[in-house]
Amino acid sequence: MTAIELDGVINFRDFGGGTGADGRRIRRGRLFRSGHSAAATDADLRRLAELDVALFVDLRRPPERARDPARRPAAPRARLIEHAGPTDQLVAPHLTFLADPDATPLRVSEQMTVGYRGYPFDPHYVAVYREYFALLADLDGPVVINCHAGKDRTGFLCALTLHLLGAPREEIHADYLATNLHNRADERLVEMSAQFEQTHGRKVSDDLLRSLLAADLAWLEAAFAAVAERHGDTDRYLLEALDVTSQRQDAIRARFLV
């Protein structure tokens, strides 16, 4: 994985380059992940234009996108997949507990676990995943996946992508945890604290926010455990829930492995 430093976009990195199926490698320069791009500078947009992106995947809900509209480079050929709803919740369902004055870092972890276990089955996310994997089979060019911080929703979809490409679990884990190196937690802490006070009319502890900003491997593993409970394993989930047939998997691997 290779981080790309941008002024106004956090956690932007190439998550290719690792081990793939059958002794092959995952292509570099084709799979990117990031936080949202609302604060992208003109210089950032010029840098992103050089990637010649073919597909943007925005996992943020509509109210998030309205609050922080994406800035993307002009890319006439690029497709865009967006989360389609619901439209009336500015605060993500798994973060509403933060309004509780008695919220603790332990409570953060418990609620994030609940959220991660829901990602594989939420119909709005499933619709995005299905379209994403269908396009990957025919895509000629790079992909950029983002949510708000490029950590949780992005983390799960990137982990699924790496699994499909044959990456070993330890490399999937390493990519997920790299967020902790590239999420600019200190500067985001100030921003999130101000947003929280504006929304809830009171301050929130730095410890609580830091626990929310981190990538915790237990949360990612909770998502895969939920998949295994319902489908037996991740491959069957990809087939049964997301229509990733063996033919589609072969086509995706042919495009993204070398």
Image (cartoon, grey):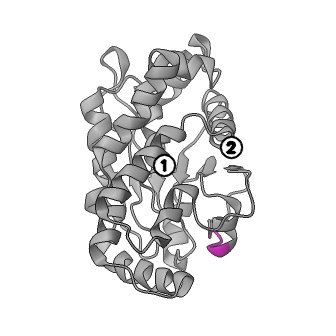
Q: Nearer the viewer, residue 106 or 130?
A: 106
Dominant SS in magenta = loop
The amino acid pointed to by label 2 is: His
Seen in the picture, residue 255 relative to 54 is either above or below; the reply is above
User: Label 2, on which residue?
Assistant: 124
The reply, left or right, for residue 126 in relation to residue 229 is: right
The reply, left or right, for residue 112 in relation to residue 148 is: left
- Residue 248 visible in the current orientation: yes
The reply, left or right, for residue 222 in relation to residue 65 is: left
The part of the chain drawn in magenta is 67-71
Seen in the picture, residue 152 relative to 132 is either above or below; the reply is below
Identified at 64% across, 68% down, the residue is 90
User: Label 1, on which residue?
Assistant: 154
Q: Earlier in the sequence, mark 1 or mark 2?
A: 2
Depth check, mark 1 against mark 2: the one in front is: 2
Q: Nearer the viewer, residue 222 or 202?
A: 202
Give coordinates of residue 62: x percent, y percent.
Answer: 70, 61
Direction front: furthest residue:
102
- Residue 3 visible in the current orientation: no
Identified at 38% across, 36% down, the residue is 222
Q: Nearer the viewer, residue 40 or 258?
A: 40
Q: Quadrant of residue 194?
A: bottom left
138 part of magenta stretch? no
Direction top: furthest residue:
246
Give coordinates of residue 234: x percent, y percent.
Answer: 46, 22
CB-based contact (under 8 Å), mark 1 and mark 2:
no
The amino acid pointed to by label 1 is: Thr
What is the CA distance from the residue labelled 1 to the residue labelled 2? 14 Å
Residue at disc 2, secondary structure: helix
